[in-house]
Amino acid sequence: MFQQKIRIGTLVSGNGNPVEYIKKILPHGFESFSITFWQTLGGADLKKMAEDVRKALDGSDAVISSLAIFGNPLESDEKAQIAREGWSQLIDAAELFGCDIVAGFAGRVVNQPIPNSMPRYKEVFGPLAKQASDKGVRIAFENCDMDGRWESGDWNIAQTPVCWEMMYNELPAENIGLEWEPCHQMVKLIDPIPQLRKWVKKIFHVHGKDATVLWDVVREHGVYGSHTFAYHRTPGFGDSNWTDIISILRQGGFTGSIDIEGWHDPVYRGELEMTGQVYGLNYLRR
């Protein structure tokens, strides 16, 4: 019953040269790749990129798990318009990459409390959800706060379960779900396990990123003060019990990818980036 395939992969920047990067790291054994863009697609020829990526993957069992764009599509400026166009283009291109997930930030009305963004969220993502549904594509929002809080922020409303409840009440689309990771909850001092059990059916994609919470610092200095109280970590170096996480995902019927989000670990970065990622890959496989 619980033998569903869960792939372990990594993120690849779409704004750089994703094809060459995939060719370079594919021999390490990554089983999936999430191609991600920051704020803009940068004029990328998605059709050609898809053709080249599929050639690079030919002969392997690896797949493209998802496409993603991380910007703020809820604002009214040019960057927001570019982000909205990026969402639409990725939804149309997903089938070319052989995937059915487009992920990213839900956006936010800047410097307003989260509830004030809900009407604009529905206005923007209602049509995108319909476009995605017509294409057989699922939308997955990452649970990253980007240093935003309930009262104000710049990027993303899809931060915690209470936010997700509000979003689903505002726009109850079956093809809208989560790109979830434990890290973003842990650095808020939230236990990620209870929410994972509750929301597992709505988790479409998982970022492989962990956290280490320095509880001695919390007890002495509190949070969001002068001392760092938590670090984002590559899986295998943080506090999460990934055996529990993967067990809950399997019990919930999850069959997607856990793609490692690197470039955050305070130790395994720079020259040690791929050392950390390959360790994380093998750790999650075990």
Image (tube, grey):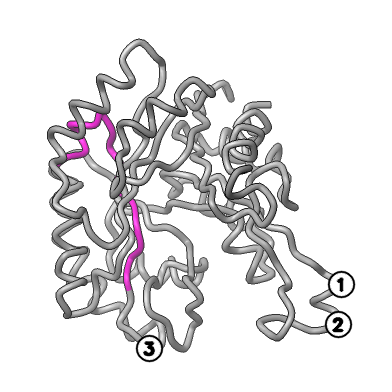
Label 3: how many Cα within 10 Å (few below 14, some 14–19, many 20+):
some
Q: Are marks 1 and 2 in contact (CB under 8 Å)?
A: yes
In front of the other: 231 or 267: 267
The quarter of the rendered structure image containing the N terminus is top right
| Vertical order, 138 against 187 (above or below) | above
User: Residue at label 3?
Assistant: 111
Question: Is residue 106 shown in magenta?
Answer: yes
Type of amino acid at the residue the image marks with label 2:
Glu
As measured in the structure, the alpha-carbon distance from the residue carrying label 3 to the one carrying label 2 is: 30 Å
Where does the image place residue 211, in percent across and percent down from the top left? Answer: 67, 57
Measuring 86% from the left and 82% from the top, which residue is drawn there? Answer: 220
For numbered disc 1, what is the local secondary structure? Answer: helix
Image quadrant assignment for residue 82: bottom left
User: Residue at label 2?
Assistant: 220
Label 2: how many Cα within 10 Å (few below 14, some 14–19, many 20+):
few
Q: Are marks 3 and 1 in contact (CB under 8 Å)?
A: no
For numbered disc 2, what is the local secondary structure? Answer: helix
For numbered disc 3, what is the local secondary structure? Answer: loop
As measured in the structure, the alpha-carbon distance from the residue carrying label 1 to the one carrying label 2 is: 6 Å
